[in-house]
């Protein structure tokens, strides 16, 4: 029996644990402690959970309540000055995986994320009722009046397009699916509302963060990006406008959040050349393919 206990797979045990609350009774609590102890000894969990059984138990309880993997909760729940905060991308993924709504999409007004008229809101449809669930507009007026962009090292100054998307998702979730976030704000929100002191972020660190975000998206959608490049090359060589419709279809097939990550390149071009970015930004057709002859 002892040898069987020693060979328990912590990840598998943790996934089984979310079927019951860690605080649902003496037996459940004892089981959760065993699972939590195994997880706390793993080098794969973040520092705040290593050799910290109480934090692991809380993560197991949260995972149970939102129906997520305990390991994913640990990887995406950050402590900011003693307060827990979700990764915004995890919050979006949780909504999309709930199967209660269509995937979150983001409506944008304005072309320049640094311009005062730029705004973003999140929307999705309730699959059961068909109701369109539309979130609040996140505007520069809101950002400035709330003081979000004035914090030292604020990412609103360096990557506003991504911050608008993440904040729109957080607002939407609190209105339409608060049970998925459990009332926990995102990490970025905790920083912005002043519940944490943020030190000035060196430019090199900002560049590294952008590169990591960009490279992850570029790797995930490498085949689509390569197809986009081929279609743009075909257009440049032949002038065939049908190639632009292909580019549009491929580019819009990438989720909007990932497109933002790709656009916020670590250098001037990133995975896309200056020419390719110009085509995507300025030359993609807005009409249907059968109207291409009128272009």
Image (tube, grey):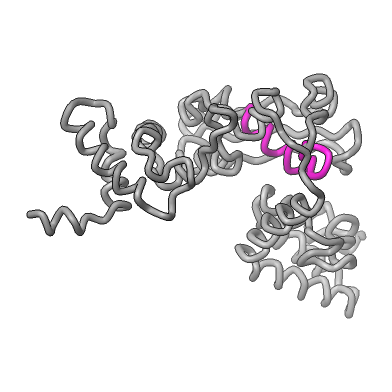
**Residue positioned most to the bottom:** 237
Image position of 66 with respect to 12: above or below = above
- State the residue at coordinates (16%, 32%): 27
x%, y% of residue 147?
80, 23
Quadrant of the rendered structure where residue 220 is? bottom right
Work out which quarter of the rendered image holds the C terminus and state it: bottom right
Q: Tell me where the magenta segment starts and ends, as one range.
A: 154-171
Which quarter shows the N terminus?
A: bottom left
User: Which residue: 60% across, 39% down?
Assistant: 88
Main secondary-structure element of the magenta-colored stretch:
helix
Residue 122 visible in the shown view: no
Quadrant assignment, res 103: top right
The image shows residue 109 at horizontal and vertical percentages of 82, 36
In the shown orientation, is residue 83 left or right of residue 19? right
Q: Is residue 157 above or below residue 214?
A: above
Question: Left or right: 235 with respect to 87?
Answer: right
Residue at figure coordinates x 83%, y 39% from the top left: 157
Q: Is residue 38 magenta?
A: no
- Residue projecting furthest to the front: 51
Camera-side residue: 229 or 58?
58
Quick check: can you spot residue 99? yes
Looking at the image, which residue sits at the far left?
A: 1
Is 132 placed above or below 14 here? above
């Amino acid at each position: 029996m002892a040898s069987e206990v020693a060979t328990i797979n912590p990840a598998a045990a943790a996934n089984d644990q979310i079927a019951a609350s860690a605080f649902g009774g003496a037996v459940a609590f004892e089981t959760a402690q065993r699972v939590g102890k195994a997880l706390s000894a793993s080098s794969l969990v973040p520092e705040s959970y290593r050799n910290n059984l109480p934090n692991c138990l809380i993560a197991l309880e949260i995972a149970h309540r939102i129906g997520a993997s305990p390991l994913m909760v640990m990887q995406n729940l950050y402590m900011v000055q003693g307060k827990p905060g979700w990764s915004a991308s995890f919050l979006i993924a949780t909504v999309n995986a709930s199967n209660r709504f269509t995937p979150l999409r983001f409506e944008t007004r304005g072309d320049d994320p640094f311009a005062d008229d730029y705004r973003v809101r999140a929307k999705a449809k309730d699959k059961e009722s068909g109701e369109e669930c539309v979130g609040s507009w996140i505007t520069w007026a809101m950002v400035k009046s709330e003081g979000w962009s004035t914090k030292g090292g604020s990412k609103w100054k360096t990557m506003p397009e991504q911050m608008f998307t993440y904040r729109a998702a957080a607002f939407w979730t609190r209105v339409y699916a608060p049970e998925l976030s459990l009332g926990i704000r995102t990490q970025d929100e905790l920083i912005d509302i002043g519940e944490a002191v943020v030190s000035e972020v060196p430019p090199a660190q900002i560049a590294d963060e952008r590169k990591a975000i960009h490279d992850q998206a570029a790797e995930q959608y490498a085949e689509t990006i390569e197809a986009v490049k081929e279609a743009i090359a075909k257009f440049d060589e032949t002038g065939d406008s049908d190639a632009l419709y292909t580019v549009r279809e491929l580019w819009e097939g990438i989720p909007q959040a990932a497109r933002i990550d790709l656009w916020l390149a670590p250098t001037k071009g990133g995975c896309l050349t200056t020419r390719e970015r110009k085509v995507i930004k300025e030359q993609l057709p807005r009409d249907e393919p059968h109207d291409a002859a009128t272009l």
